[in-house]
Image (cartoon, rainbow, N blue to C red):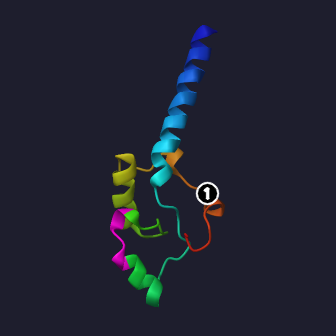
């Protein structure tokens, strides 16, 4: 029983540390293709600070490696699309 309690405490503390470390990470944008001023604004932003976008494999991989240390998608890094604001702002 003590091992279970200790394990739960360790897991809870790790979840708190992981959530605060990823707080600076950009969110998701629903736009796959950007036009006009939005495109210019995205291109002027460094790649690690841009929003994640569907089907943008290279940029998403660069950001994932930068913020999570691995290019592989893990269960804890997946994001529900309904939780992201429309337009990624």
Viewed as shown, does residue 82 lie left or right of 23? Answer: right
Q: Main secondary structure of the magenta part?
A: helix
56, above or below 26, in the image? below
* Residue at 47% from the left image edge and 48% from the top image edge: 22
Count of picture labels: 1
Is residue 44 one of those drawn in magenta? yes
**Percent x, y of residue 68:** 39, 47
Viewed as shown, does residue 48 lie left or right of 13? Answer: left
**Percent x, y of residue 50:** 42, 68
Which residue corresponds to mark 1? 80
Is residue 42 one of those drawn in magenta? no
* Residue at 52% from the left image edge and 62% from the top image edge: 27
Magenta residues, as a range?
43-48
Examine the rendering and report whether any part of residue 37 can be seen: yes
Q: Quadrant of residue 45?
A: bottom left
Name, please, the residue furthest toward the top: 2
Q: Quadrant of residue 4?
A: top right
* Residue at 45% from the left image edge and 44% from the top image edge: 21
Specify the quadrant that holds the C terminus: bottom right
Examine the rendering and report whether any part of residue 35 can be seen: no
* Residue at 57% from the left image edge and 11% from the top image edge: 3
**Is 54 or 14 nearer to us in this picture?**
14
11, above or below 71, in the image? above
Specify the quadrant that holds the N terminus: top right
Name, please, the residue furthest toward the bottom: 36
Viewed as shown, does residue 41 lie left or right of 15? Answer: left
Label 1: few (<14), some or many (≥20) within 10 Å? Answer: few
């Amino acid at each position: 029983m003590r091992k279970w309690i200790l394990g739960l405490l360790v897991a809870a503390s790790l979840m708190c540390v992981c959530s605060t470390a990823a707080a600076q990470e950009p969110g998701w944008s629903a736009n796959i293709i950007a036009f006009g001023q939005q495109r210019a604004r995205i291109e002027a932003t460094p790649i690690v600070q841009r929003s994640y976008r569907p089907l943008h494999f290279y940029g998403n991989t660069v950001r994932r490696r930068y913020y999570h240390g691995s290019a592989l998608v893990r269960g804890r890094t997946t994001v529900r699309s309904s939780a992201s604001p429309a337009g990624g702002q």
